Image: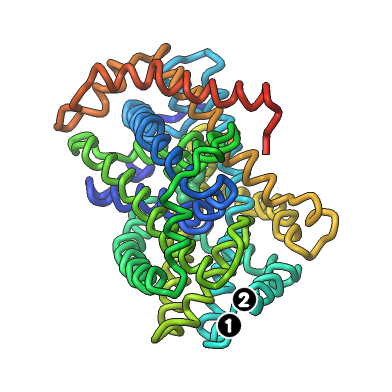
Amino acid sequence: MATSPSSDRGAWSGKLGFVLAAAGSAIGLGNIWRFPYMAAEGGGGIFVLVYLGCVLAIGIPVLFAELSIGRATERNPVGAFKKLVPGTWWSAVGGMGVLAGFAILAFYSVIAGWTVGYLWMAITGTFGPDVDAAASAEIFSGLIGSAGPAITLTVLFLGVTAVVVRGGVAGGIEKASKILMPVLLSVLVLLLIRAVTLPGAGAGLEYLLRPDMSELTPKVFITALGQALFSMSLGMGAMITYGSYFPKDASLPFAGTAVALADMGIALLAGLVIFPALFSAGMDPQGGPGLVFVVLPTVFANMPMGHLFGVLFFACLSIAALTSTISLLEVVVAYFVDEKGWSRPKAALIISLACFVLAVPSALSQGANAWLTDFGWLDVQNIIWGNYGLSIGALLICIFVGWKWGTDKMLQYVEMGGNPVPGRAMFAFVVRYVCPVAIGAVLAFLIITREYF
Ligand code: TRP
């Protein structure tokens, strides 16, 4: 049953509230943990180049497509499609999004748990000046490889997420983002200065900034596309949900663009910290989910007040992760509240418990359980849902807006509240043709070449 939006759905306090909350959703482990890890798997500079192309040509159009659907319907992803095209299978696209959000939350909260573990270790002084690459790798596998801490931290993180989501969107999410995003940015800038001045840092900059065309494979495209979508929280309806809380009289084009650029900037910044530090410490850029966690302590070990920076950094990262897990859980909760008539507290509790069950194999796949570790369960989840799920979701959203709902409608809701969109015709063309063809081509190529991972 679809209920009409009412005041207890909540709304952002205004444009700034939206920008902070949407940037809070977008900026998270995707930028700081996933971006460097995917960049290392995708060959460095060539990955960054394709990623930037994906953000501009696909990410930003899909962002506005999702926000306009949300604004037009004031619904969760399933309800939104039901309202725009009742009685069609399009609501299944929303349903897939809700499912993807749930699955992403299940592995994301495991990594988020690690950041809390790292915060704790930073506070207690684990990352002293004698931490080199090997010692850091040992600390990392010690934390994530034992079932107890890995599962406890996941529970803790999901629990806090559930408590915030239970309280509704406006209060907690906005307030936390307002303070912590600027702090995170400042800490990253200071770490950047330290990282690029480490001996041997130049090789890292070169790795990240000089594309090696011979590394361009179909895999780079899916990895970069998936990363752009994951980082901007696209392809599963989170931005439909967030757009649904956007005030009708506020102007969207600038707000949306600001979110996209902030997200991209933080990812690049993280890369510029990690790779110079990694090369300086004499490590190999081989990727894997541990990349950031192993590299960063070697930076803290090498800087004045490293202890303080370690604490600040992991505190900010934990909160950045929290504002993202909130948005993932919020989509699923909004669906059960709007469509199934559940109360917010009931939805938050039941869904986070179910999510925990799915998170356990991810938590155990980093050494605690041999079979799950060999299988690379967490990696596989990340790639299936993050790269493939979101790409397919974004493809369907573009087809919907471009060919079913209409780009005129999209532009009407993007422009509602002021600020015309520059280059309307080109924007429409990109959503109708460029995005679907580009995403479709990447998926088709992978099927042909069978180079899925
Ligand atoms: N974008 C977040 C990050 O970069 C993760 C995230 C939050 C997300 N909500 C999402 C990813 C929805 C995909 C879809 O950390």
Q: Is residue 140 left or right of residue 221?
A: right
Q: Name the residue beneath numbered marker 1.
A: 131
Above or below, comparing residue 123 to residue 220 in the picture: below
Q: Residue at x 41, y 78 (%)?
A: 309
Residue 397 position, x and y percent, is: 46, 24
Residue 83 position, x and y percent, is: 42, 21
Mark 2 CB within 8 Å of ligand 1: no
Q: Compare residues 438 and 370 and report the one nearer the observer.
A: 438
- For label 2, the SS is helix
User: What is the basis of the colouring in this image?
Assistant: rainbow
Q: Compare residues 78 and 216 and report the one nearer the observer.
A: 216
Residue 221 position, x and y percent, is: 53, 34
Q: Amino acid at mark 1?
A: Val
Q: Compare residues 358 and 235 and report the one nearer the observer.
A: 235
Crowd tier of the residue under label 1, counting other residues whose Cα lies within 10 Å: few below 14, some 14–19, many 20 or above: some
Q: Are marks 1 and 2 in contact (CB under 8 Å)?
A: yes
Q: CA distance from mark 1 to mark 2?
A: 6 Å
Q: Is residue 423 left or right of residue 355?
A: left
Q: Amino acid at mark 2?
A: Ser
Q: Residue at x 73, y 50 (%)?
A: 377
- For label 1, the SS is loop
Q: Name the residue beneath numbered marker 2.
A: 136
